Image (tube, coloured by chain):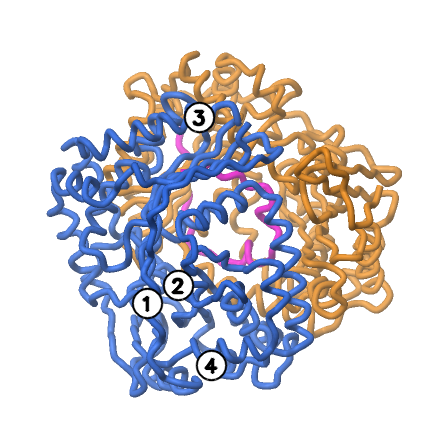
Chain colours: A orange, B blue
Amino acid sequence: MNFLKLVFIFCLTPFLAQADQNVQEITLKNGMRVLVKEDHRSPVVVSMVWYRAGSLDEVNGKTGVAHVLEHMMFKGTKTTKPGEYSEIVAAAGGRENAFTGADYTAYFQRLEKSKLPISMKMEADRMQNLVITEEEFKKEISVVMEERRWRTDDKPKAQVNELFNSLVFRAHPYGKPIVGWMNDLQNMTYEDAIEWYKMWYSPSNAILVVAGDVDTKQVFAEARKYFSKIPAYEIAKRKPQFEPIQNGSRRAVLKAPSKLPYIQMGYPTPTLGKDGITNKKEAFALEVLVGILSGTSSSRLNQNLVKKTSRAINVNAGYSMLSRGGQSTFEMYGTPSEKVSVVELEKYLKLELKNIVDHGVTGIELKRVITSVIAGEVYQKDSVMGAAMQIGQLETMGYSHKIVDDYIDNIKKVTSKDIQDVIEKYFHDDALTVVTLDPQPLDKNKTPKGRPHAH
Amino acid sequence: MPIKVILISMLIFLANSASAALNIQHWKSSNGASIYFIENHDLPIVDINVDFRAGSVRDTKQKSGLASLTNHMMVLGSGGINEEDLANQFIDIGAQLNSSFDQDKSGFSLRTLSEKRREAIDLFTLVLHKPNFDNQTIKREKKRYIASITQSETMPESIASKAFMKVLYGEHPYALPGSGEVETIKKIGKKDLQDFYKNNYLSNELSIVIVGDISREEAEDLAKKISIGFPGSKIAEEIPLVNYNEQQDIKISHPSKQAHLYYGAPIIKRGDPDFLTLYLGNYILGGGGFVSRLTQEIREDRGLAYSVYSYFMPFLEAGPFQIGIQTKKDQVEEAKKIIQKTVSNFIKNGPTQKELRRAKDFMIGGFPLRLDSNKSILEYVSMMAFYKYPLDYLETFTTRIDRITAEEIKSAFQRRVDMSKFSTVIVGSE
């Protein structure tokens, strides 16, 4: 089983596309919230506990601790041995996992519907009775370092992304890698993990989301039984953090073993306000822009740079309209074709933006985005897990899950002019950050050859 | 890439006790296509998947990558409609077209809103019957294949998995990398694609699975429509037998931080009577995530790796039993010793009664999870259809699992899994 890390979760349009009128909600007396969505198509249930704690809340010197704690949550409680809950869930035929993001940490189980109490009992226990020993920590921190080597250190594009984030966000914690810097992992102690647990794992900082073939009232009753007696404590007040305005482009080069170069570029952009209203016009314009540039074989970047001109092997764009930390970037990435340099690809990507500023987007393009979103809404209903994920992410990030209700309407309102306006306002060279991959030969004694390199 | 393989193998092996509730309707078309239909009107969605016996096992060494390129080119223009227009026509009705590819099969799937099913199905059949194989597009896609191949030659996981298949399969087509080699891709032209299509996209070797909001009558029409547009219905060529006899240990240097170790041998094919027993046993050995012996020894007890796993991946002919791990370079020999000890101990003694009980509880208790969406039903039944599993496969699955004894697992491992024949590939060794 893997621990997922969700970094670019909201890149594409179908994410928000589910009108769910039937989510029921209560708040337990200790402040823990419980949200339930019934779906009776199959006798299964998904149960997720979300904590409003992620790498966003970490401090220098202790990066990666949110994710390390996620690993330690499988290492036993006052009354259970390390791994015992995993055995219990497996013996119930269940699947379980956990993931850490910048904005949250979440734990989930998928079970046959009658087994739901197993999940609640376990989550309630490890919410209050987790045991972190030095011995277990030492083993697990090695696992996490292996995870970092595997995810980032041996993957050139992941390294580019890590460098990119640290360039865009100098003050804001989104500049730190979710998995943590290797040095911080090497120096992390079991006390750091305990400190994190005691800081953020209060029921008042947690949300339980249950979706599937359940009876809402019964879920509420079970949730009260298992969670409501857990004492809450005060969560440290979070200071607002904002990245200072960028004045001047930022560029960096990363060298790593690779044959092909690669470019990641982007601009800071607004996110949707937690009220669902602030920045709405701009956030939705950016959301539609991503859908027009990227995501299908006929989107602009693919058509213009890969298919028609063969300037790139592949190109994509990404944007997150939602974020707990209130910051976001609009990004483009790509691998140039042979004989095209990363400098030229950067130029071509910018030309695509300029082309929209000069000529707008067509009504057909806007309509295609709307069609995809509407169909995406229906298709997403096929996944119980998807429904639970969506509710949990929104609520943990500080939005109401109800903002999905008028998502399609907001997409429909976006005009060509709105898109031109956001490009003109945010996509200028002084706000640009670019990181390129300079491919190095596997054998260090050989010098790279055959391709133009941009520095 | 190992991750992808694991996901695929999970889909393929797992089954569901709710199968009694899963009413699979099955029939054959007049020209031999095999059709599976699951009617379900809960959501206004229709899903269709078709699979052909046209995976990379049909490739030759000289033009390796042809099968994959054919699969890929099939969705890039059809019936004279160019690539861009075709993509737009799908998008304009909110329909999704996807292709899939592996050693044995080439597959295509369509997801559409049921209200748009007629237009979507027309487009889908056009894609299946009338690929353009346009010269300009072929030229461009070949370049992209070559770029991707050269890039994968720098990635330790890709290097390792390619070397491992080469060691296990030698001259057998299973040794050929799905996307081909730079030199073989260069040799492929339009005529090759057309011939490959003509010889391998056969209606009598075709399986069609339809799930969702559509009536039986319409499903029959649709299946007929799909199955009658193919070039031929000759008997497909047999896949050569796997002949593995030379155990090898390969080390490839790489500047990576981690070494990637692959360890195993070709063991079992689809339909083998030992498969379910080996599969259940492997859940205990290395297939069961956190609760497997390998994860316990390597990760939980020693912190040596983030991921370690084992699986049987049966093909139409003998597929690999494979163990994989990534770990810091200076730990890889230690990890290999622990893996060997764990596997050899399992072969020698089999599982404990407690482990067996828990493995069965997992398989049986988790049954409904396998088929909890139209998409998962489509994938599962497509696997059954392609490999010609009996129709009652799902219904009898839990009973068959429940009957397996610890002694049978031990015996199956002792008869089938011979560690002295295991080959090893390590990329990034010191």
Q: Chain of mark 4?
A: B
The Cα–Cα distance between marks 3 and 1, rounded to whole angstroms, is 40 Å
Q: Chain of mark 3?
A: B
Q: Nearer the viewer, mark 1 or mark 4?
A: 4
Name the residue type under label 4.
Lys
Sequence-first tag of 2 and 1:
2
Q: Which mark is residue B198?
A: 4
Which chain does tag 1 point to? B
Left-right relation of B120 to A7: left
| Circles 1 and 4 on the same chain | yes
Q: On the image, numbered disc 1 is attached to which residue?
A: B386
Q: Are marks 3 and 2 on the same chain?
A: yes
* Crowd rating for badge 1 (residues with CA inside 10 Å; few <14, some 14–19, many 20+): many
Across and down, in percent, residue A139 comes to 43, 19
Find residue B104 and name its label: 2
Circle 3 crowding by C-alpha within 10 Å: few under 14, some 14–19, many from 20: some
Whether the magenta-drawn stretch holds residue A15 is answered as yes
Q: Are marks 3 and 4 on the same chain?
A: yes
Mark in front: 3 vs 1: 3
